[in-house]
Amino acid sequence: MKQWMSLALEQARQAARQGEIPVGAVLVHEGQVICAAHNQREATHDPTAHAELLCLREGARLLGDWRLRQCTLYVTLEPCPMCAGAMVMSQLGHCVFGAADDRQGCCGSVYDLPGDPALHGVTTWQGGMMAEECRQLLQAFFAQRRG
């Protein structure tokens, strides 16, 4: 749903304002937002502080279960190998992302990690929701950094 991706985009904008790569995520369970996060690698000096991982961790904590089969993760950028792996390991039900990532995307662009039959995953994904807005935010951020 676009409303959830709009919330993820607001998280991404918050990340950009803090000097983080503008990626935002929202975790939804049974039609309700459970948590939202944005990249925090620079602030925390933590290479795993991607928006998706922060959402999955907090969602599991709030639900009291590491299995997130009934959840959908909305994220502004196609998940990387680490985040796609965490989605599979958490048994996330579904992921919806905005912009594709032709360099590191592991939900169809470079590789389809959730779809790999060797992993017996349950996570499905779809890309392209509000893709242009997500892409423009990333492009503007990197253009400003290169300035």
Image (tube, helix red, strand yellow):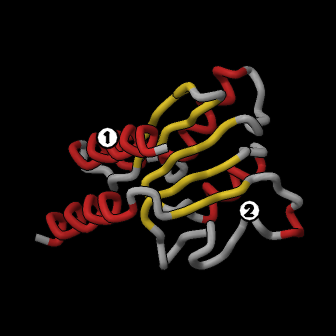
Amino acid on which disc 2 is placed: Pro
Measured as percent of width and height from the top left, residue 99 is found at: 43, 64
Q: Residues within 10 Å of mark 2 (few under 14, many from 20)?
A: many
Quadrant housing residue 85: bottom right
Q: Is residue 56 visible?
A: yes
Q: Is residue 39 left or right of residue 119?
A: left
Measured as percent of width and height from the top left, residue 28 is found at: 58, 33
- Would you place residue 15 above or below residue 130 in this image? above
Instruction: Name the residue located 56 percent from the left edge and 36 percent from the top edge.
Output: 27
N-term-proximal mark, 1 vs 2: 1
- Which residue is tagged 2? 114
Q: Residues within 10 Å of mark 1 (few under 14, many from 20)?
A: many
Amino acid on which disc 1 is placed: Glu
Instruction: Name the residue located 10 percent from the left edge and 70 percent from the top edge.
Output: 147
Element assignment for label 1: helix
- Which residue is tagged 1? 10
